[in-house]
Amino acid sequence: MADQANFSTMRRLRAILGGAAGNLVEWYDWYAYAAFTIYFAPAFFPKGDQTAQLLQAAAIFAVGFAARPVGAWIMGIYADRAGRRAALSLSVGMMCAGSLMIALTPSYASIGPAAGVMLLVARIVQGLSVGGEYGASASYMSEMAGAKWRGFWSSFQYVTLVGGQLVALAVLIILQRTLPAAALDAWGWRVPFVIGAGLAIVVFWIRRNLEESHSFVAAERSGRRAGTTMTLLRDYPREVLTIIGLTAGGSLGFYIYTTYLQKFLTNTAGYTKVQASEINAVVLVAFMLFQPLMGWLSDFIGRRNMLILSFGGSALVLWPVMTGIAVGGSVAHALVLAIGAVALQAGYTSISAVVKAELFPTTVRALGVAFPYAIANALFGGTAEYVALWFKSAGNEQGFYVYGIAILLISFVCALLMRDTKRHSRIVED
């Protein structure tokens, strides 16, 4: 029996690590856009000052998010019908195509406005891909994690999600240190997208060899049919609204401290591009390390309590953190404030996948996780940079802080009203 348990543990670990590796590359490709925006924005949008260029690039970033609900809907249905493994393979193939397209798109100087259009199309393809990725990977990793330590193991979805962002930032820092600034502006920003396309091909092969989740296999053997969008909305409206409410504040907070922070450090606080990138990298390392700790803690105190602490704390600190960073100062000053903020944010992100997966039965789980999440993520996460820059361009940057606090408080109320999914999980297989 001990050998069998050992074997099962190894199979479980292998599946989670395989899913996590693919998740890392998928999110690296997605975040390379955000990490390199400050360099490629002038190539596609040459008119206006830096804020205007970043605003246009952020608008396309937001459009990519708008494609995510469509991808989540299509790929969620596909994952519930064809399996988690098939959906994960398809999503990474689409991400490869989008990254390669960005890498090869000529600049505005070569083809005029068509450059921006091609960038938009590539970002839509990536949005469709990553929209499907979240639901399939969240369902797969939660189903393979096991009941006792499900919070801990499923937290590795965000470990690799943040890890992908960190790798993108690491590539940026390496290029900043090895290439002249003129070369990075001219062609160096294309390098990370070539790397991402190559890694995606490797991950496609890895995912084709993953073991299918036990929950999906059990549902298939029992003859249960995959649910439809109508089934989801008719039978699980409370769960759908809960995910939208939690994701609103969770996604907004995440993108403030991971994606927008880099621009905020240079465009508001006065740090150099290199300093901003390095501060962002340290914050992301800390954020990544917080994930398994918070996921493990949720296995003891429950998912609901963790979410209440995360959203309540995040709402309280957003104003002092952002205004504190805005005044500039030493690198250490910015690091302390930002790391404190992401420690609270990790209370949500570490269990984001498992909370959503535990709300739904197998037949609608991937769709139920992905679709409402992608809608809220598009509305509040994908627009975070654009809204922040809009407030800044209007001369009322602190208005964005008030907006952020209000959304976080909505998520706090949703956490108060929900049941603890650890005690009432719909993932019945161990």
Image: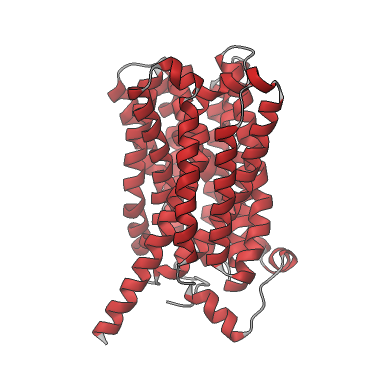
Q: Is residue 412 above or below residue 75?
A: above
Residue 72 rendering spot, x and y as whole percentages:
63, 55
Residue 141 rendering spot, x and y as whole percentages:
45, 63
Q: How is the image coloured?
A: secondary structure
Which residue lies most toward the left here? 2
Q: Is residue 302 visible?
A: no
Residue in the picture at 61% in, 17% down: 52
Q: Does residue 167 appear to the left or right of 264 in the view shown? A: left
Number of marks present in the image shown: 0
Residue 56 rendering spot, x and y as whole percentages:
63, 24
Q: Is residue 73 visible?
A: yes
Which residue lies most toward the bottom here? 1
Residue 130 rendering spot, x and y as whole percentages:
57, 49
Q: Is residue 265 above or below residue 372?
A: above
Q: Is residue 198 above or below residue 37?
A: below
Residue in the picture at 27% in, 87% down: 1
Query: Which residue is at the front of the view, 366 or 241?
Result: 366
Image quarter hosting the C terminus: bottom left
Q: Does residue 254 appear to the left or right of 328 in the view shown? A: right
Query: Which residue is at the front of the view, 24 or 380?
Result: 24
Residue in the picture at 37% in, 38% down: 284
